[in-house]
Image (tube, rainbow, N blue to C red):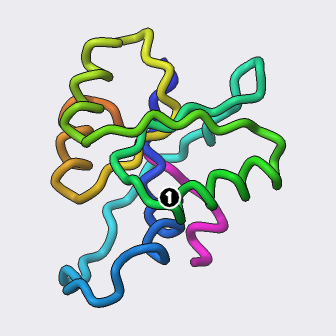
Amino acid sequence: MKRILAVAGLTLGLAACGNPDAPSAPETPPAPVEEAAAPSAGANGTINVYSARHYDSDKAMYAAFEAETGIRVNVRESGAPELLETMKAEGARSPADVIIASDAGALYRFQEAGFTQGVSSEKLSAA
C-alpha cells in the first residue's frame, strides 16, 4: 500500500507558508524516525497527495515540484477527518502517497490509524 506521511519534509516546506502571527507551540525534540524509502512515482509518473490544506501557496509548491521532477502531482483536498475516513474505506487500495494534515492532532489520528511511516533524509537533517 502506498501510504506515506511525509510529515518532516512537507511540514518544513509548508511551514514557510504558515501564518507568522499565529502563536507557536513550544519546541520539543522530534521523535526519531526509521529509515524509509521516499515515495516513488507510480508507473505513470504521478504522486497522489491527500491534503487538508487549501492554500494557493500549496498549489505553487506542487507546480514547482512538477517542473523540477517531471512527476505529476494529483491532489485530493478535503478536511482531515474526511481524508482519514476515505483512507480507512480505501484500505490497501488507497492511492495516497502523501498525506498533508492541517494540525498535529490530525497527524496523530493518521498515525493511530497506521497511515504513517518514518522518513530519513540528509536534506531534512541539514535543515
- The answer to which image quadrant residue 61 occupies is bottom right
Q: Is residue 2 magenta?
A: no
- Above or below, 85 against 119 in this view is above
Give the left or right position of residue 38, taking residue 2 as reference: right
- The answer to which image quadrant residue 5 occupies is top left
- Above or below, 78 against 108 in this view is above
Instruction: Tell me if mark 1 has few (under 14), some (14-19) or many (20+) residues whose alpha carbon lies within 10 angstroms of its own.
Output: some
Q: How many marks?
A: 1
Q: Is residue 121 magenta?
A: yes
For the magenta stretch, what is the residue range? 117-127
Taking the view exactly as shown, the residue that stands out farthest to the front is 56
Give the left or right position of residue 106, taking residue 83 as reference: left
Residue 111 in picture, x, y percent from top left: 25, 40
Residue 18 in picture, x, y percent from top left: 39, 75
| Residue shown at the point (40%, 11%) measured from the top left | 92
Q: Identify residue for label 1.
A: 10
Q: Nearer the viewer, residue 11 or 73?
A: 73
